[in-house]
Image (spheres, rainbow, N blue to C red):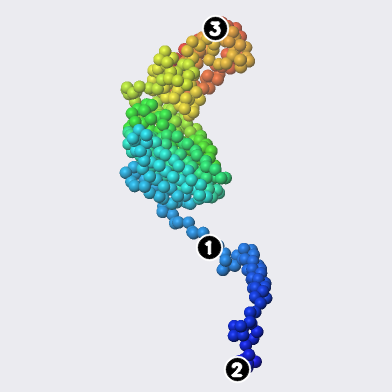
Amino acid sequence: MDLGQRPSSPPPGSPLTGEKRPSWPWLLGLAVLGVVVAVAIGGENTRSRGLSSPSTAAAPTASPLPDTNIEGQWIEWKGDDLAQTFRVGGYSLSVSPMVDREGLPAAQLKIVAPDGAALDHQTSASSWANLTFMVVQMDAADPTRQLIVADYSGGAHCCTQVTVFERRDGRWNRSELGSWDGDVPATPKDLDNDGRKEMVFVDQAFLYAFASYAESAAPPVIKQVHQGKITTLSSERAFRPTYAAYLDEVRPDCLAGSNGACAAFVATAARLGQLDAAWAVMLGAYDQASDWDLPKACRIRTKDACPPEAELTFATYPEALQWFLGKNGYASPAYIAPLNAAGPSFECGAARTAGEQSVCTLPALAIQDRMLAMAYTRASALSRDRQALRASQRAFLSARNDLADPAALSALYQGRIELLLAVD
């Protein structure tokens, strides 16, 4: 048909003819077309989910916000600061001031781990309400970061509660390192070059024990937190360089006559296997005129305060120090005669030799044995040649074990006691 010419007559069903064209063929065509389009679209959507074509893929998640602080450095929040949020090592740490039920200031710390898990931590209430924390990788072979929180309570010579948090295997680990003198702990360091960092504190048992706080000295305490487990490593040989450095630091004060420094000096030397040599130095340096109240031993086993009637007061600084070091794990325990003791200084259940069995059988010999043990403990504290003293004690025990006659044993004991009491 010539598109430029008008048709000679309108097509059937044209409005011009007045006839009505049936509608069902058009409706049917539209329905078929709809089905085809729907199938085509469905097929396209199926291909988009499987291939992630650029036109239909979900928008990428937002990149993590940059850190505001550096890993391995302490972050300090003061009680008079406003609420703040810090980001470091994948953690988000939000600190805000609060007031506890008693009206004392405190800090609320909201911890959000790298996996999005959240944990709330409230500091102890005090007049300070300061908070110091650090995110650090404690193990070079483990990508998990740890959060160390130091909660300072304020007050003179006190005290910081140290807690380590980490998110591992879908759960939180919380390790309580305890309360320590001072404010901010030392930054964790890998002291023995094994790839794991340790934390160094001080042995607080030495504070006020032999001198005032200002004149006290305290040997290092080395702890490690690994996968939520706390281990004390102070006696490990790998950390002897740390103790050697402290020994050099505290030696001059001991030589100057500081009883507080001498206690730390001898304890540190014990960690290095140099107890006897350090003991001789201490005996020549300590202040014999000091009027500081020495530690007291308890002659009964109790978890409560020692009853006054069971307390043992030492006559000299070396005797008190020897007992103190044994009590705190730096040396062998010093013998303290139990209150109302009846048997000898050793366990009779382990008696094997003729001499031991005789001592366990006869009360008079048992008394002599306790007297000898006390005399030896005193002599060990006062002797400048502890090695020779131990050798002579071994010789005495060998002779005693070979004897069974009570009279001969009693004479042997008496002679040894007199020799030990002569040490001063």
Per the image, the residue denoted by label 2 is 5
Q: Which mark is residue 59?
A: 1
Q: Position of residue 345 (x, y in %)?
A: 53, 15
The answer to which of 174 and 419 lies nearer the viewer is 174
Q: Position of residue 172 (x, y in %)?
A: 52, 42
Asked if residue 45 is positioned above or below residue 134 in the image, the reply reads below
- Label 3 and label 2: CA atoms lie apart by 145 Å
The answer to which of 131 and 347 lies nearer the viewer is 131
Asked if residue 278 is positioned above or below residue 112 in the image, the reply reads above
- Label 1 and label 3: CA atoms lie apart by 90 Å
Q: Please, what is the three-letter code of the amino acid marked with disc 1? A: Ala
Q: Which mark is residue 363?
A: 3
x 32%, y 36%: residue: 127
> Looking at the image, is mark 1 or mark 3 nearer the viewer?
1
Q: Position of residue 97 (x, y in %)?
A: 36, 43
Label 3: state its secondary structure.
helix
Q: Please, what is the three-letter code of the amino acid marked with disc 3? A: Pro
x 65%, y 84%: residue: 12
Q: Is residue 343 visible?
A: yes
Q: Please, what is the three-letter code of the amino acid marked with disc 2? A: Gln
Q: Is residue 187 visible?
A: no
Question: Reading the chain from its start, which is encountered first: label 1 or label 2?
Answer: 2
Residue 128, image quadrant:
top left
Q: Position of residue 73 (x, y in %)?
A: 42, 48
- Label 1 and label 2: CA atoms lie apart by 56 Å
x 64%, y 70%: residue: 34
